[in-house]
Amino acid sequence: MTDFFHGIDKIRYEGPESDNEFAFRHYNPDELILGKPMKDHLRFAVAYWHSFAWPGGDPFGGQTFERPWFGESMDHAKLKADVAFEMFEILGAPYFCFHDVDVRPEGEGFAENTARLREITDYFAEKMENSDTKLLWGTANLFSHRRFMAGAATNPDPEVFAFSAATIKTCMDATHKLGGENYVLWGGREGYETLLNTDLARERAQAGRMLQMVVDYKHKIGFKGTILIEPKPQEPTKHQYDYDVATVYGFLKDFGLENEVKVNIEQGHAILAGHSFEHELALASSLGIFGSIDMNRNDYQSGWDTDQFPNNVPEMTLAYYEVLKAGGFTTGGTNFDAKLRRQSLDPEDLILAHVGGMDACAAGLKAAARMLEDGKLEAARNERYAGWETSDGRALMESDLETIAHLVEDKKINPQPRSGRQERLENLVNRYL
Amino acid sequence: MTDFFHGIDKIRYEGPESDNEFAFRHYNPDELILGKPMKDHLRFAVAYWHSFAWPGGDPFGGQTFERPWFGESMDHAKLKADVAFEMFEILGAPYFCFHDVDVRPEGEGFAENTARLREITDYFAEKMENSDTKLLWGTANLFSHRRFMAGAATNPDPEVFAFSAATIKTCMDATHKLGGENYVLWGGREGYETLLNTDLARERAQAGRMLQMVVDYKHKIGFKGTILIEPKPQEPTKHQYDYDVATVYGFLKDFGLENEVKVNIEQGHAILAGHSFEHELALASSLGIFGSIDMNRNDYQSGWDTDQFPNNVPEMTLAYYEVLKAGGFTTGGTNFDAKLRRQSLDPEDLILAHVGGMDACAAGLKAAARMLEDGKLEAARNERYAGWETSDGRALMESDLETIAHLVEDKKINPQPRSGRQERLENLVNRYL
Amino acid sequence: MTDFFHGIDKIRYEGPESDNEFAFRHYNPDELILGKPMKDHLRFAVAYWHSFAWPGGDPFGGQTFERPWFGESMDHAKLKADVAFEMFEILGAPYFCFHDVDVRPEGEGFAENTARLREITDYFAEKMENSDTKLLWGTANLFSHRRFMAGAATNPDPEVFAFSAATIKTCMDATHKLGGENYVLWGGREGYETLLNTDLARERAQAGRMLQMVVDYKHKIGFKGTILIEPKPQEPTKHQYDYDVATVYGFLKDFGLENEVKVNIEQGHAILAGHSFEHELALASSLGIFGSIDMNRNDYQSGWDTDQFPNNVPEMTLAYYEVLKAGGFTTGGTNFDAKLRRQSLDPEDLILAHVGGMDACAAGLKAAARMLEDGKLEAARNERYAGWETSDGRALMESDLETIAHLVEDKKINPQPRSGRQERLENLVNRYL
Amino acid sequence: MTDFFHGIDKIRYEGPESDNEFAFRHYNPDELILGKPMKDHLRFAVAYWHSFAWPGGDPFGGQTFERPWFGESMDHAKLKADVAFEMFEILGAPYFCFHDVDVRPEGEGFAENTARLREITDYFAEKMENSDTKLLWGTANLFSHRRFMAGAATNPDPEVFAFSAATIKTCMDATHKLGGENYVLWGGREGYETLLNTDLARERAQAGRMLQMVVDYKHKIGFKGTILIEPKPQEPTKHQYDYDVATVYGFLKDFGLENEVKVNIEQGHAILAGHSFEHELALASSLGIFGSIDMNRNDYQSGWDTDQFPNNVPEMTLAYYEVLKAGGFTTGGTNFDAKLRRQSLDPEDLILAHVGGMDACAAGLKAAARMLEDGKLEAARNERYAGWETSDGRALMESDLETIAHLVEDKKINPQPRSGRQERLENLVNRYL
């Protein structure tokens, strides 16, 4: 035991009335919700990068956190892992997620990076034998090192494409070895800073080809997890190719991968793209590409990725309502892609931020489940579209402009608007909270 | 002659040194640019709605313009047409565009609307016999009347779908009759206000089906023009389904229409979606769906559609550079989807706004052409991607992750970043202005 | 009785478990909160304009509502008033607010406008004798008519300044007559569309002079209410002079009016200015100019004034927490400057939107009161600044740079950061909801 | 000579037709504009931090630049200074600006920081004896070190206030010693992350007190330069107290400092606050607090500080038009608070970025001067307000509401709107470009 968390005990459920900061008020892992334990609905994961690798910097200031594992040796990496698994245990986190660079120091080149990743993932594997925490997904960080400054798959330099491909292979191997349930691609530098030096069509083709290679390799090694793309509109780039769910869908269709790849949707990225989180969830579900979520909260008024822990239960409710309507997670889960504010220096802050986030999600899930069980919202929606379920409605979808024009003229069709009842439905939602 | 424009004469080209407000300083219709007359590059169109139908209202105030043709009779509609054609003549505008509701008063129902549209388009047809102004595109306004408040094709009520289909047919007929070179769909209400009352998947299917009907009808009547969708992210809706070019592309692929339908890209709509105009142009071109442009300027800091006349020549240059690289317009053109500020009350304002916009576009086109002819920008771009044109580069695109990983390891590939030279290229662009 | 509301009865409090749409679940007018009846904390007002005068239009479509009182006669105006007072009664609304143009048809000029306003406010006065609903504030609409298109007080034309001044006098008289508790100025056109035609310094001076006249007139007629300015950053203008609370404060200081005028803060306007609502409340309170609130909700992702009814209880909690910390309302109150979505056509929608909004505010107030009573949040805040309450801390504020530099050098002061505990405090807030 | 710039010669003016990348096409230092040499109008300064201290990092990646002076020793600091002065020479930059942390390595505490700053500024002083480059302004970086994470003047911990005060004194001394013409305060952490842990009123009072101390110390040491505050709305904070020009003005008025302190306005910060650059310039001028400018360009669609070199000449024109109307700079100047894109790795990029920026500013200045000399724009503006120069107009400003109401009624004043002519004026501006 590292004692980093100063003897904080495992967090237990104590119910809504508890005033113990170190207890769950809503997250009760084994409580059945719609017949399934809450933990299996939510499938929480801790993000290694924000919790253990981020030093607290922002564009105007450097490190604020002082962690005993900050350093460039493998011993530091192992100490970091020790603390991480202690935190997973304290939180009862069923999953975690990581990038290669979060868990191992940067080496001299590809070979050393690979060797170090193997060493640390062996170390993880040992720990996981005595832990209830599994790997939700692994991924390669192809955006932080200066070699990726102009893109990874979409780099003008084929050597960077090659280095990226090799690194992805390594990370897929590591994920597979650890029993990861998904493999994620976030293309932080797959985009451009200026069109003046960019061949957008070529770069898009490179990205498509890389994704095909990833899918091929998945099948080759027998990885049963899901390949996920994480959309984001911009930052660090001026424009990122995986802008939002709709953009990724068009891209997948173009390369014939819409049945092979799904999306990992982040609340903050949805917001930055101008969409509500529930929009992105509903759209992905309707297109058959809903995979997993990165849960956080973006300040609506800060134009960058704020990655805050979620805390607005009404918003969580609408999000999990879409997750439930999509049938819930299969291989996906709720990954807290959220970081402490850089002023939150204490080990306790790290625990409490997760406790609060897990509770907000759990409260949202429960409200969403009540809303779905009660059925009033769905009934109102269905009633609104009832005309399309009549034979006339169905026939219309099979008809053509000319026939319809005759119909409208002959029957003097003059449709009368009906109330959309938005406020009434908003009131209804508030009842389940 | 109506004398609305108080004897303003046809606008002539007088060159950059002219200080005559009522002259072109850059737009010289017959001047050859890259071997083609400027007018055939730009293919300017006047938008009937903003110039002749909009009363000057905004959400906080009503009509400011006092036009003799404001009124609900067919005589008013004809006077409006008289003035419009006079303005086309003054500007030497090669094209115009219109919605049904711009040109005829609203009738009691579909039949009367149709009859009135026929009457007024017959009146147009007569005028066009003695005019050099042709129809760039026609379209149906399926967003202003209260019957469309919850959508046209995507309405929960099948009767509205039917009314919309019939109206589109009528407008396609009118466009075909007048020799229109395109038919445009802008789905101002094809989206939602709240997901709570919306079945997004169903509405998307309705929109797809309507578009298929439009394409079928086009072929049936032998209309040779292009069907265009105009993307916009939101406003009036909270979310519009045709969010941006990438979204429309995914939609077209889904319904198998990517070879049948192209996009009409508006500067202001690009901006509101978080994209630069040139991004949307370059993307559409790379996806093979570039069709036409709605030229205006959106205030970057006002979160609604400001539809101002363009005046920033450096921005026009980047836009027309993409148009030229895409091969220029075929059936498309430059439609001024721009309106006077509501304080610009005078007939002269209407003329001068167009003169300024045409000049800004012409200056941009000329700079873009110089830039393309000079070739330095394209040379710099090509040089950046030169590695991909080597046999090693080409082989990489055909390889797989495992082979590449071996290659990286064996050859100790360790790519070194090269300057992206953005500022240098920005300086270069400024030389052509 | 007009029967517009089809026999909807007075809304009663039934408690959180009620599933009656037409009941309050949280708003219990006489329930004591921190020793004061809830109704006296919240001081709800109905906004005449959105509820009774707005036809449902937006920039892309016209009227959707069909109300029997839409029309230009005084009889229409009286029917409108009848329905309005019926709604006040149904809701148990303690207050209402109005602009002159909401309540009377536009006349031929100033004299007729004045006469009509007198006639309708006499009609109001009669009704108010038998009603529990009082006037929170009155105001003049100096933005909708075309005469105000270039500003009211800030117009380049002195005649418009004069017309505006005269109209304000009339509206102040009306407000005074009806016992209004405040008089509000919202300068929808007091700003500019382009700096090119604007003399910003001169216009600002005009605005300052008009405000001084308003204050003088208030004293002259013995109006005891508060003069309020309502900040908004833009829309309809490109830039509105009363941008936000901080801007208004500087303006008041400049004209020596900071003790005479306070602010009416709107949630949506705060959002559009890039601030949270609670920021604007806290700032106004700290500057001594907090007056009243316009309660609504602006879609964070739509760049225009969406004026939706509030429904996010966590946000309401933070807002009323600031109101309570500011000492609560004196003459101010909670005016619902919120409108139905334009698809919400039914009379029931109008009632239910208010019921939901009142309930969201009441739930927020109750949570805020619990939070304040419990004291944990304030204790944490005070503890953070405790160093400033020591004698060393106090001395520092009286010192000078040189003395302090010596002190830092001599005592080797090297401050160590302490956790800001943001997530912990966010968790704490969630406990009171 | 360090040879960092590989023998790039001093940049000379070669005129608009030059295609030499390493020449000025518009900036001709001694050319007279409105009777004054261009260099004295523009007063260009190089920003030490972006050009020499920034490693190329962003929130998603680290260092991209490899500079021989990166390191923590005083030798590194001196090498950096050598290169900096070589660049000033190459560019012919009349000024530079710096923060303490840009120029010296961080020491163990205040005393060592002070000693190092003295040592390096002595080194600067020597260099400046043989250089034409002077110090436009100095400043203290009170935002990067973790001790400032919760603010400097506005920190909850008085020790941080003390450390900040001492550091400011040191930096003012250094600025004074080097003959700096201004001293700037940018409060990057003077704001808050969350209101939950913030006492906004107290923090504002702390900020006010610190500013008074700064002004007192200026007078004490006989510093003749101007004290400048640089407004910015947010980033790194959620809300920065010096939000924009209007906010700073109210703050200065509150502490009685409006005649002692002026503003340093940054284009990018104006944009992020929702204002055009020219708005902030015009406002500051009208309030008598215009001081200096930080020239850069913020991407309108990226919600963070992009600090790009300016390149849009029409925008520069509007900015310098306001500067000229304000009477030009006195102690202020044009500081390039602009950084290379992180992919622009080469020494040449650093030179060319400045060359392009200087040329864009010079072109803008020249166009602005032509516009001012020609007088048509000012004439149009004056004509618009001519009514206020009549005796009736002037009398109105001295009148009162009641008198005016009688006047309007008696004279049946019914103002008629006149065209605002925005498009016509926009066309006019385009003529000078």
Image (cartoon, coloured by chain):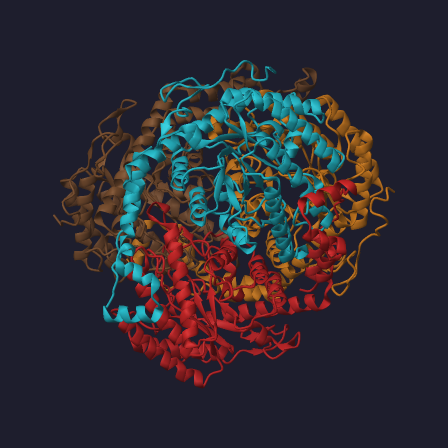
Chain colours: A cyan, B red, C brown, D orange
Q: Quadrant of the N terminus of chain D?
A: top right
- Residue that appears at 21% across and 49% down: C347
Q: Quadrant of the C terminus of chain D?
A: bottom right
- Residue that appears at 29% across and 48% down: A382
C162 relative to A182, above or below: below
Residue C235, percent from left and from top: 42, 52
Residue D180 showing in the rendered view: yes
Residue D326, percent from left and from top: 60, 51
Residue located farthest toward the left when viewing the structure as drawn: C1
- Residue that appears at 80% across and 54% down: D11
Left or right: residue D300 versus residue B205 is right
Residue located farthest toward the right when viewing the structure as drawn: D1
Left or right: residue D79 versus residue A418 is right
Nearer the observer, D428 or A145: A145
Residue located farthest toward the bottom when viewing the structure as drawn: B130
Locate residue C132: give its quadrant. Answer: top left
Residue D413 showing in the rendered view: no
Residue A400, percent from left and from top: 35, 68
Nearer the observer, D125 or A77: A77
Locate residue B82: give its quadrant. Answer: bottom left
D83 relative to A400, above or below: above
Nearer the observer, D271 or B243: B243
In this figure, what is the number of numbered marks? Answer: 0
Nearer the observer, B96 or B170: B170
Residue A432, percent from left and from top: 31, 34
